[in-house]
Amino acid sequence: MKRVIEPELMNDPEQAAAYAGSDLDRAYWLFMQCFKKYFPAMNPEGAILDLGCGTAGIPLRLARRFPACEIYGVDGAPRMLAYAKQAVQREGLENRIHLVRGILPHRPSILRRHYEMIVSNSFLHHLADPMVLWQAVREYGLPDATILIVDLLRPESEERLQTVVNKYMPDAPAMLRQDMTHSLRAAFTLDEVTSQLHKAGLAESLCLEKATPFQFAVYGNLRA
Ligand SMILES: C[S@@+](CC[C@H](N)C(=O)[O-])C[C@H]1O[C@@H](n2cnc3c(N)ncnc32)[C@H](O)[C@@H]1O
């Protein structure tokens, strides 16, 4: 199946509201499961950068699980960030979760220069140029930084795509099912992600594997 790109930013009010609800809890849970699986003994300290943080589903979970960390989330969509800020305030985590508006590859002005860890969930497939993510990993990661990038895999056919949507989002609102359909069409294959890692000079330090039947994970530590 050929890749069909989708708009980068998600600033539609209905989309932002849906992301702030509970329909994506399972997706966030899967991300945290990947974290446990790939870094079983890890209890990180320092600063974590979440690229394309959306409504802060991942920063909130990281903050609860790793109390010694500060989390920086960057996203280009003001509506997503508005929901993210509300959620962070609700949990009283303003001191540990910092949200910044920024459109990569432009450097957001109030971010730290480098981070002990860089994460991202379902962001790569939004980028017209996927190298924007891998360059950000290189640019913002400290030597030896921990990396976990999770995203969708593009299915081989429309038929398989519909099976994935029906299996993993059976009861979600129609808008979210449509969103997942577009996202799967815009996603990359394992071969394409492999090429991206080689091009970015990250293939030797980071591992790539199929994390679930419809997602890949790139994980490991940058070379010091
Ligand atoms: C599918 S959402 C995922 C959000 C979040 N990571 C999650 O797991 O819920 C992708 C997010 O990336 C943001 N985004 C897309 N392209 C971007 C860019 N070039 N710079 C910053 N944010 C971007 C969108 O606005 C959207 O919030």
Image (cartoon, rainbow, N blue to C red):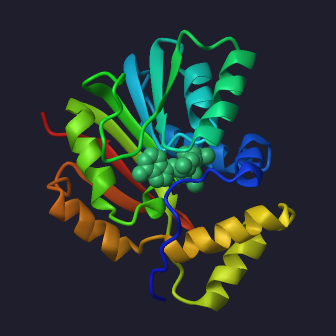
The image quarter containing residue 136 is top left
The answer to which image quadrant residue 28 occupies is top right
Comparing 218 with 5, the one in front is: 5
Q: Determine whether, in the image, residue 198 is placed left or right of residue 123.
A: left
Q: Residue at x 49, y 59 (%)?
A: 8
Residue 163: image location, x then y, percent = 71, 81
- For this rendering, which residue is in front, 94 or 189? 94
- Residue 19 in picture, x, y percent from top left: 71, 47
Q: Is residue 169 visible?
A: no
Instruction: Please state, as top left, top right, bottom left or bottom right, where the C terminus lies in the image.
Output: top left
Measuring 41% from the left and 61% from the top, which residue is drawn there?
A: 127
Q: Give the total number of marks visible in the rendering.
A: 0
72 is higher (above) or lower (below) than 148: above
Residue 87 on image: x %, y %: 71, 26
Residue visible at 30% across and 54% down in the picture = 132
Q: Is residue 37 depicted above or below 174 in this figure?
A: above
Residue 32: quarter of image: top right
In the picture, measured across the screen, residue 172 lies left or right of residue 221, that is right
Task: Point out residue 190 in the picture as x, y percentages from the top left corner.
Answer: 38, 72
